[in-house]
Amino acid sequence: MTRPDTKIEAFHAHVYFEAEQQPQARRLRELIPSRFDVNLGRWREVAYGPHPTGAYQVEFAGELFGELVPWLMLHRDGLDILVHPLTGDDVVDHTDYAMWLGTPLTLNIDFLRRNG
């Protein structure tokens, strides 16, 4: 699907982790804001909304994409990360416009459809 008139307001990176991966997830959570101007979301140890495991969100401006995403590729320490734009359409943002670092997880897209 192409939408040339769509404006990307910012991006989210959702960092996913299982209980045994919490140390890596915490380290990454400390490193990211020490290098980049981002907004960190809440630390959630269990599945929530469309997200199937514990996770936290990193919101960042489009200008950081070219620096932050490659940095995450190299520093994710085995964690799976979903990166998506914020266009105002949560379903498309989390599916068609999304990219994964690591193994793609199955999101609860029905949650986004019901709450979008």
Image (spheres, rainbow, N blue to C red):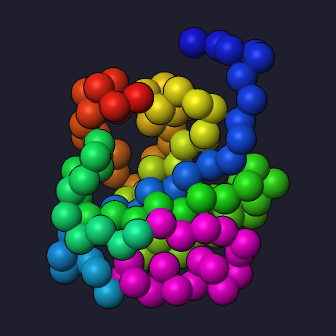
Among all residues in the image, which is located at the extreme right? 63
Q: Nearer the viewer, residue 61 or 66?
A: 61
Quadrant of residue 54 within the rendered picture: bottom left
Residue 72 seen from this side: no
Q: Is residue 8 left or right of residue 40?
A: right
Q: Is residue 94 magenta?
A: no
Nearest the viewer among 110 and 24 is: 110
Q: Which residues are magenta?
A: 24-41
In the rendered structure, the answer to whether residue 21 lies left or right of residue 62 reads: left
37 in the magenta segment: yes
Could you tell me residue 88's position as x and y percent? 58, 30
Image: 82 above or below 54: above
Q: Quadrant of the C terminus?
A: top left
- Give x and y (percent) for residue 17: 29, 68
Q: Residue at x 44, y 57 (%)?
A: 14
Prevalent SS, magenta region? helix
